[in-house]
Amino acid sequence: MARCNHGAVMLNPLYSRGKEKIQKEIVMFKTLRMWITLAAAMMIATKAFAADQLTETVKNGC
């Protein structure tokens, strides 16, 4: 019983450090995902805007 408890005490700092690292990675992943979503939205908006400009140019040209 005492041996098991000792093992848990030894593992505890390692576990909490691992948990912190995982939480940091989750935050990084969420931030990365946000940037990817933002970049995709910007690309879509730019493409839509470019297509709109192109049709305007064609209309005005003809």
Image (cartoon, rainbow, N blue to C red):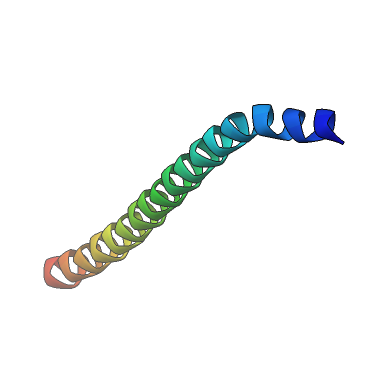
Query: In the rendered view, would you say 9 is above or below 33?
Result: above
Q: Which of the 4 image quarters holds residue 46?
A: bottom left
Taking the image as shown, residue 8 lies to the left or right of residue 45, namely: right
Query: What residue appears at the point 60 percent right and 29 percent down from the top-left corner?
Result: 14
Query: In the rendered view, would you say 59 is above or below 42?
Result: below
Residue occupying the far front of the picture? 2
Residue 18 in the image: x percent, y percent? 57, 34
Query: What residue appears at the point 43 percent right and 48 percent down from the top-left corner?
Result: 27
> Camera-side residue: 21 or 27?
21
> Camera-side residue: 55 or 16?
16
Residue 59 in the image: x percent, y percent? 19, 72
Query: In the rendered view, would you say 30 is above or below 41?
Result: above
Residue 29 in the image: x percent, y percent? 47, 45
> Camera-side residue: 22 or 56?
22
Taking the image as shown, residue 58 lies to the left or right of residue 20, namely: left
Query: What residue appears at the point 18 percent right and 70 percent down from the top-left corner?
Result: 56
Where does the C terminus fall, quadrant-wise?
Answer: bottom left
Taking the image as shown, residue 56 lies to the left or right of residue 35, namely: left
Callout count: 0
> Camera-side residue: 45 or 56?
45
Residue 55 in the image: x percent, y percent? 24, 68
Where does the N terminus fall, quadrant-wise?
Answer: top right
Q: Which of the 4 image quarters holds residue 16?
A: top right
